[in-house]
Image (cartoon, coloured by chain):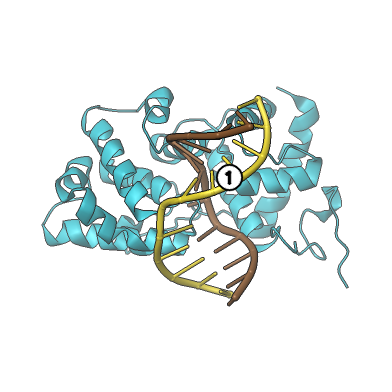
Chain colours: A cyan, B brown, C yellow
Amino acid sequence: MDTEHGTIFIRLYELLLESYGPRGWWPLLGRVGQPGFDAEGYHPGFEPELSNTDRFEIAVGAILTQNTSWINVRRALGNLSRHVRDRCTMLSPEAVLDIGTEVLAGLIRSSGYYNQKARKLMRMSSMFAGIKGVPERDGLLNLWGIGPETADSILLYAFDGPVFVIDAYTRRILSRVAGFELDASDQVYHRLQSTIQNALPRDTGLYREYHALLVEHGKNRCLKRDPLCSDCPVRGMCDYIVQKP
DNA sequence: CGCCAGGTGGGAT
DNA sequence: ATCCCACATGGC
């Protein structure tokens, strides 16, 4: 384990967790109403046993949320699940394949890039319909429309894979806190992921919570334009302190 | 209004 | 390998 970076990453995690509390990721719309889930499907402090439908919903959400805010994705997922429910089926790869690209695009319109995402969902559904169990990372990456972040999100949150997800928030926060690269290339993705995974215990629950906390921090505190540094929970260890009046 | 959002693929240099 | 662009809706 890389202890030099390990200290930084663990300290950052502790501060974020203390400040925001467990996030209860990944949200599962299909479980709203069940014990342990809130109105948006989050399940803080509770790790549910995932059904195949849950796993597939996570994979669909991972594609829909590419460069898109979750609120828009939620509406799209709602339309999709209502559509399959009206046909008395569960959300599944086969159900999505039955919908077809054109109708699917209409259902997910609110998530943006809906023509591309409809094609991505069709291809991913074909793959899931043809395998049993856990998909290979390379198998996901070979699909048109699934890059490293989407593949790792699916593996981490849907299939319990111990892979750390690197997203725009992760790069932004780590570039400010500790001078890591901000670049979004696959090269940097892999380097940063290796550094983090070598510095932290190989723990799926930790990776899940950590990524969710980084999203929370990046979305509401460590903003792109004007980060709210004045009473930031991380300011004691951050190189990028902007003093605000 | 303008900017941003839990990226990815394709093409030119 | 690196830069640039298309893809697109909805919230603030």
Name the residue at 30% across, 44% down.
Answer: A119
Please give the residue where the numbered disc 1 appears in the rendered image. Answer: A211
Residue A177 position (above or below residue A75)? above
Where residue B1 appears, as percent x and y from the top left, is: 60, 75
Residue in the image at 55% along x and 38% along y: A165
Horizontal side of residue A163 vs A71, given as left or right: right
Along the viewing direction, whichever of C2 and A136 lies nearer the viewer? C2
Q: Position of residue A218 (x, y in %)?
A: 65, 55
Q: Nearer the viewer, residue A218 or A206?
A: A218
Within the image, what quadrant is residue A139 found in?
A: top left
- Can you tell which quarter of the image residue C8 is in? bottom left
Furthest toward the left, the residue is A87
Q: Chain of mark 1?
A: A
| Left or right of residue A100, residue A152 in this image | right
Please tell me which residue is depicted at 40% across the width and 46% down the height of the picture. Answer: A63
In the image: residue A161, left or right of residue A189: left
Query: The C terminus of chain A is located in which quarter?
Result: bottom right
